[in-house]
Amino acid sequence: RAAMIDEFQDTDPIQWCIFETLFANQTIPCFLVGDPKQAIYRFRNGDIQTYLAATQKITATYALLRNYRSESRIIDAVNQLFIDRQAATFQHERITYDTPLEAAGKPREKALLVNNEIDHRPFKIWTIPHRGTQWRLPGAESETMQFAYALCARGIANLLTDPTITIAGACVRPGDIAVLVMTHDEANAIATQLKALRIPVVQQGTGNVWATPEAQQLALFLEAILNPQALSTVRRALLAPWIGLTEAHIDALNSGQRCTVELGGIPRVWALQDWVVFFEEQLTLWRTHGFPALFQSLLHAFSLPARFAATVDGLRSHTNLTQCGELLHQAILAESRAPEVALQWVKEQINNPASSDDAKLRQDSDDDAVKVMTVYTSKGLEFPIVFAPTLLRMAAASQNRVYFEYHADDQLMLSTDAKDKQAETLEVNQEALRKIYVALTRAVHRTVLFALELRTGKEPLNPLGELLGNLADPDAFAERFGADPALAVTAFPELPEPLPYTPVSAPQLQPPPRVPIIDRSQGHSSFSALSPKQGETVGESSSVDHDEGAHAQNVPPLFEPDSIFAFPAGASTGTCWHAIFETLDFAASPEALRKHVEQHLDAFGFLTNPAERDARLAVTQRMVQRVLATPLANFVGTETHCLTEIPACDKLVEWEFNFSAPHTQRTTQA
């Protein structure tokens, strides 16, 4: 047995105290797996100092020196960018990058090729101008970042439509690309730009479903359902994009006019009062059959899956709405909430979105799509191509702090003294460099990093600027990255106007070859096979019952107990009677007949109940005797005879005979 603690660099002091208590003095080996260069969860109490203190107590250490993920030139670029020089790149004497990482590389048939050649500079750095009037790091909604978002989307569009760039012999697809950002706002902005170019995109682990427009619209609908007589509430609900009404339509409804809307696939011309009635009916449905019935009714009434599918971001909207509906249903079940209380719960979630995993935005599709996620979410993952357009925004220090957090002697310190701000700034800057490292080591084939171009060289640098240095100076660039750089710097790349992206169509599905159908309406059958389908017709959904009046007579509801018709029905009964007649000597004496019947009934399990044994034996014996004594026509004269007159030597068992049936009649009972 052994213990293994993965991602150990993100351990906090309390966790390490527990691990050390459990394993430090035990015979069970404990393996700590971690990379201090990837410690990026300071905001979650991940403590790199805990990792460093723990490693001092460990005698045996092992290092993984070969990368099996990425192409060789990508690893060369990472080495050139992060290798320690005069000072440690990560600004910590115990977090070093002093040995270049080796690369297993990729065979040519699996590599990214440009014009059928290996890209020897696969790490692209795109510098963009600072568009502010004052030098400061751009905000998420600044003009600089709006330009960066648009440039990122255009760069992806050009990759997808460039036939000269291939991965493993195939053109680049949306699913090959990931965009790594620092915040949810950045992720939303990037996704918006991609959707504008009709590029499929999926956001992973970014945002809360209760902060989406769909949550707001669901709340409006529920409010209209609970208060249908409040016309202002009904009007607000009707403006939801689910319905398709515009403000002009609402004005027309307010003036007493009718508007056409499609409900359940049927066009309806409704006045405002018709909508009031509709919402009243939905409330009745909710109270009578529960919230799931109401939710499904809304999906069907407004054809929401089809409506969402017809819009650029419809799949995202459908996923959000469905997730809100499921969470509300779970909340109703958990506390038996009435409709009024359920609406209040929804409003509380919208006003104060919970940080639970259940409320995180779900992935809206598993289809081929560009993945947009935070650097935190990306840790441990890999992607063929990575865009990192927002690392340039990371600051070197926290802003507007009234107290400062830093470490001294492996202990966490809290201080309100301004002189300790520099100690905190150093730790924030160190972690920012580690975040950059995580983001820039996710790619297999290509990385595209955005950086701010320097105007004077005197601007205050952020962590990314410190790492890159002065990229505009060829001599400084050559000194930093060597004579054979794997990085390529492009100042404000002039990308061509992107061509409309058209997803590769799935292969047309072909129906299987037609198999000749055997006409089973023609052929031989038996009474046993025909009787269960008595009355069915071939090629018709129904047939005229010519004997309809024959069943109009009053029939006693129950058979007499001593009648053969009181005998249990079923296939076993039929098989038993068939065996009785097939093996019976028609001329047998009453005693022999009774014994014969008793043997067969017992063999088929009809005499196991002592209370019914005598009655079943008697009724079956009478039935057989009546059959044997029934007069039968002679067909050649007027005389009649019965089965008792036929000796065993003249009896044929399972005699084959044929009677024709009408062509349209599947079964006929003679």
Image (tube, rainbow, N blue to C red):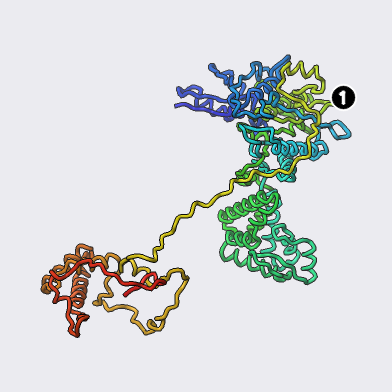
Q: Residue at x 71, y 28 (%)?
A: 432
Q: Residue at x 48, y 23 (%)?
A: 29
Write down the residue under mark 1.
456
Asked if 374 appears above or below 560 in the picture, the reply is above
Q: How many marks?
A: 1
Per the image, label 1 sits on a secondary structure element best described as: loop
Q: Residue at x 59, y 53 (%)?
A: 326
Q: Which residue in the rendered view is the most extreme toward the front?
A: 636
Q: What is the quadrant of residue 27 in the picture?
A: top left
At label 1, which amino acid type do we have?
Thr
Q: Which residue in the rendered view is the most extreme toward the top?
A: 86
Q: Could you say which is closer to the camera, residue 116 or residue 417?
A: 116
Residue 8 in the image, given as x and y percentages of width and height: 58, 27
Q: Residue at x 29, y 65 (%)?
A: 571
Residue 585 in the image, given as x and y percentages of width and height: 14, 70
Q: Is residue 370 visible?
A: yes
Asked if 653 appears above or below 129 in the picture, the reply is below
Asked if 64 appears above or below 594 in the picture, the reply is above
Q: Could you say which is closer to the camera, residue 579 or residue 11?
A: 579
User: Quick check: 563 left or right of 501?
Assistant: left
Asked if 524 appears above or below 350 in the picture, the reply is below
Q: What is the quadrant of residue 646 in the picture?
A: bottom left
- Quarter containing the C terminus: bottom left
Q: What is the quadrant of residue 109 in the picture?
A: top right
